[in-house]
Amino acid sequence: PLMLIAAEIGLGSSGINAEYGGTPDENGKSWCPDCVRADPVIEEAIQNAPECSCLITAYVGDRVTWKDRNNNFRKSDLQLTSVPTLIKVGTEKRLEEGQCSNRTLVEMLFEED
Amino acid sequence: MPELERAHEYNFDLAVIGGGSGGLACAKEAAKLGAKVVVFDFVHPTPQKTTWGLGGTCLNVGCIPKKLMHTASLYGELIEDAKQYGWDCSKVGHSWSNMVGNIQSHIKAQNWKIRVDLREKNVTYYNEYATFVDTHTVKSVNKRGNERTVTADKFVLAMGGRPNYPDVPGAQDYAITSDDIFSLKYHPGKTLCVGASYISLECAGFLHGLGIDTTVLVRSILLRGFDRDCADKIGSYMEASGIKFIRPGTPSRIECVKEATETTAPELRVFFTVDGEEKSDTFNTVLFAIGRAPLTDKINPDAIGLKYDPNLKVPVDEAEKTNVDNVYAIGDLLNAPELTPLAIQSGRLLAKRLYGNSTILTDYVNVPTTVFTPLEYGSVGLSEDQAVAKYGEENIEVYHTKHTPTEQVVRESSPLDGHNFAKLICNKADNERIVGLHYLGPNAGEITGGFSVGLIMGATKSDFDRLVGIHPTSSEVFTTLKITKRSGLSIEEEDC
């Protein structure tokens, strides 16, 4: 469905990337320290990603909502086990936690196949 | 990790050609010890255009998907047996595409994890085909045809091998190999496996277990090089289970009756010679498993004067060094058992000797293996024929027995019964030291792996007798072996 939506609006022919992070508070600050560290790295890497890449950011909830085992993101096909998680949609490529603030790894994920 | 002091001007300390089990293990260990390492890995697509990612044969088209498909077929058997244990298993079906989809998802996730792992460990990886220019230089090409030149102080050859196609008209056009079966986009349909290798029998085994009409075409004996008693029992078990054997026979040509589509297998007419007579039959899939050839000739070995055998195997000394001083070879390239753990072990130890201060060599003797045919076969050490050849018949004592796993007693008797088997081969001239252990039955890999420690520590028959078995298990059979082959006594089973 994510890929269909993106295709509809003409995004992501070079790859649709999805970033899952902790929901920021009213000051825009995320409760998840790894997400805070990863954000600037991902921001910069997506600027240098192949043309027509797209990045979709989704928030999994505040800390309590995420820790709940019934959290929808945990139970879904995505099988998220940690935040932040960066996934190249439609592939098996994913990076988790500290990997998301590793510039070379993030660039490698955004690369075209 | 502090980098090593470099006494050379090359781009890298170490260049590994081949990103499989051996190559990756060697590269990562070397990097851990401070070496600057590059790995070249490139898969030339099969005649059917199948290709795969980083990780080598084992992960992509070998051990891993094989074990998963073997497991899938065992579940089918267990579901049948479950009825005897009171389960109601009405109409159970199998989806080839679901199974392949899940297996390939796992493999692709591993391909990616390996790439991440190499990056995290600072190992450079080029998805490029490398060939030698001189003893310190390779040229590599990517799939778009872009070239680069890379120099290195030392090289490790770890390209492994690929399946052979026979010189039979239609083979390359219409038939597949183990390189294709694990990602086959359509249900294989009625299948012919050609070859008597463990690859042929393992594939035939799981295909049949998944409900597929399966035939095996064999030139002469099954599983050449393995213990003869065990190979015979595997054949007889597979036949009893409904797998058809054409023996002896050889394929002469393959014709296409109906082409394959994206979602359906082709219809092929296969001609084969049996007793001098030509026969034929139709199949949807023909899988050749007639042997594998190392990729030695593909790296331009003459540019460095690399010595290799007519069968393309690369001779090395005990430290895996080839005839070229700065070039080493590991894994399936060698005249040694073609096994992932052996390649990994030799890759790691080689790196430790090159970049650490180790002197430890890889032990190529007494490497345990398991053949994952429907009746699993685990072995370590020598076969009976090899033991007789090495020690002389008068010095060899063979203890053997049949056994029935307890789990199988609550099940209707069938022609499959009576094939589980255990054998210990002892050297009478050396305190009845165990020189070979062979097991046919469930969980063969788990059982053989454990007992192998005894073998490499020099266990004798009396050590095995001293050991008290765990009951009720299959493994305990090795603690109560009494009957020798020499005695001629029957090994038909008695009750516990």
Image: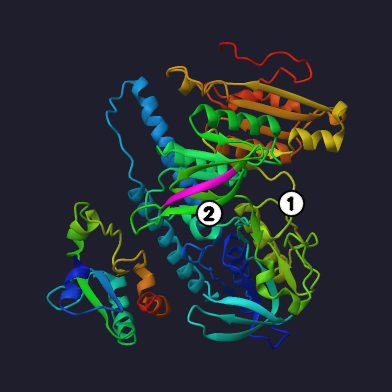
Asked whether A40 or B28 is in front, the reply is B28
User: Does B269 appear in magenta?
Assistant: yes
Label 1 vs label 2, nearer the camera: 2
Where does residue B387 sit, x and y in percent of width and height?
Answer: 80, 35
Q: Is residue B234 left or right of residue B386?
A: left
Chain of the residue that carries numbered disc 2 in the rendered image: B
**Location of mark 1 (residue):** B363
Q: Quick one: A67 or B200, which is closer to the camera? A: B200
How far across and down, in percent of the image, does residue A40 sit?
30, 82
In magenta stretch: residue B24:
no
Front position in the image: B289 or B384? B289
Q: Amino acid at mark 1?
A: Asp
Q: Label 1 marks which chain's residue?
A: B
Real-space Cα separation, disc 1 to disc 2, in angstroms:
31 Å
The residue at which mark 2 appears reads as B177
- What residue is shown at x 51% (from left), y 44% (from top)? B192
Q: Position of residue B269 (x, y in %)?
A: 48, 48
Helix, strand or loop at mark 2: strand
